[in-house]
Amino acid sequence: MAVVIGDGLRALLQDKNTIKAIATVDREGRPHVVYKDSLHINNEGNLVFYELIESSQTNKNLVASIWFKQKVAVNILGNDKTSYQIKGTPYKAIIAGREFQKHYELVQEQLGIMDLSTVWVIEPEEVIEETFEKRRQEEEKAHPLLGHLDRWVVK
Amino acid sequence: MAVAEYDREWRKKELSLREVINKYPHISPFVIIKTDVQRRGVIYTDAALEKVDDSIHQTVHRNFIGEKVDKTPVSLLLRDGTSILSGGTYQGMPTKRDPFIVDVVDGKIVLTDENEVFEEVEYWEKPAFYDKFTSSGKPMWQVAWARPQRIDINPNQYCQFWETPGHGCKYCAIAAAYKSSDKEQFLKIEDIAETVAEALKEKGRYTNILLTGGTILDGKELLDDEVDYYIAILKRIGENFGGKKFPSQLIGTAFNEQQLRRLYEETGLMTYTADIEVLNEEKFNWICPGKAAKIGYREWKERLYKAVDIFGRGNVNTGLVVGTEMATPNGFETEEEGIEAILTEAEELCKHGVSTVGCVWTVAPGSIFFNQKTPSLEYYVRIAEGLDQLRRKYGFNIDMDNYRRCGNHPDTDLSRI
């Protein structure tokens, strides 16, 4: 079931300074993670990115994922250290047609004479905030017994 | 035109699509669906036809086995990028099995069978050149057509094997299609050149150019005229490209070494295919008697091996009309026999550097085999898996004939991962 990406996360995805990575697995469950600058959100609220290399492991893993309903995970890190993980399932591989050609020309405008293999569309299903400070506070509140004693000592 | 007789009991005689998908969970359900649709064809509901837009979708189509000018889509695309060659020219003709029904559910175009929705589909889009004309006045859609990412040109609309009684390939409708039309046999080279130049203006539309057509036996040596014709065409097409070579495939008759060298050295052609059609000598002799008489099964294979020396490993393959080896009365008696025979021979070809790709045999109205029944879906799935596994075992890529270039082969679809 798709989740709605909120405005804050949407803005972070659209920020060109945000670092974006995608993790996929192959048919045997072996993981693979790469950075994808092109990752963005479309008007329908789905994640979209450009796979430039036809024979890449990411491309193969995404094909396996759409075939066998395997999940993928995206992690993004903003300049202010805000971070989110988005899990989802590939919904569509756009490899031809006017929509593909529109993206193909955009890639060439942005990157020069560069080929485009596939425009991947991923339906987001789960959003988890991974911003470290927030996670640290959550951890302290939920698990007060964890952590080292020397940090408790009053100096 | 002679057409097939419907078999009312067909669903009781084989596993259903859903049963095959469940039985083979390690094989892409998209590819299994594609295979079954290619095996059975499609018809469209009114709602599905209302979604056809002439200005966007490819509806008219001419190739060497037929022509369609109605408003139904030429073919379909699944959301994973898999093409389904849904039998545009045979649309609506009687078949032994029920076709799939393309309908609209919740606003989406879908494939259905017995009221079950299997997958969303899109209609192939027509290329930008389609509505244009060459300077000789020829509509460009009659010169070339397009798969989602490939320009397809059929320069010769007839096949000389049919000039000798009993020599035509039994599954092929090229002669029936040609003789029931008023189209010219040979495309003019200038028309081809202009159409390709126009096609190439559309950015991101094509990754390959394919030439294929009927056999021309004439020449100082057998097939010389066919080679000369293709060389002339390829030279004109090559003028569009800066380097010596360009992504291209010729599916021709099995040429001899000298002819192959001429093709490779005199043109920009990068890959070569000579379809052996049936991977068993006895069945080949029966199903393709002209090819058997003029070249022969073993010589055909030898010519493929020689082509590897010239074009390079990974750049030569052969195509099969999978399922014809099961035709009656002289085909294999059981599907197990057929699968074993095909894959054993395919492995032999791999050892010599030749990859094998399989087409799903669609019984063609007007062919000698018009009333034959194709094998079960499970047969095709097992052959596709076997051919893909052989390519992995022998380390072949199938770039030359992959899902976005040809899109006709379930086995090359499986090779995507």
Image (spheres, coloured by chain):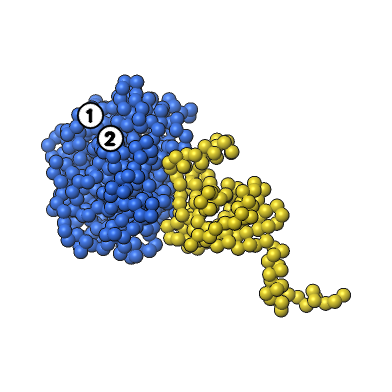
User: Which is nearer the eye, B359 or B257?
Assistant: B359
Chain letter of the residue carrying label 1: B
Query: What residue appears at the point 38 percent right and 40 percent down from the top-left corner?
Result: B125
From this view, report whether residue B54 is shown above or below residue A55: above
State which chain is coloured blue.
Answer: B
From this view, report whether residue B203 is shown above or below residue B5: above
Q: Which amino acid type is shown beneath numbered disc 2?
A: Arg
Please tell me in which quadrant of the rendered image residue A131 appears: bottom right
From where the camera sits, is residue B364 visible? yes
Q: Position of residue B65 (x, y in %)?
A: 24, 38
Q: Which mark is residue B62?
A: 2
From this view, report whether residue B383 is shown above or below residue B206: below
Q: Which mark is residue B58?
A: none
Query: What residue appears at the point 48 percent right and 62 percent down from the top-left corner?
Result: A1
User: Which is nearer the eye, B193 or B105?
Assistant: B105
Query: What residue appears at the point 60 percent right and 60 percent down from the top-left corner?
Result: A85
Q: Position of residue A78 (x, y in %)?
A: 67, 53
Mark 1 — residue?
Answer: B183
Q: Position of residue B231 (x, y in %)?
A: 34, 28
Please tell me in which quadrant of the rendered image residue B201 appears: top left
Q: What color was chain A assigned in the picture?
A: yellow
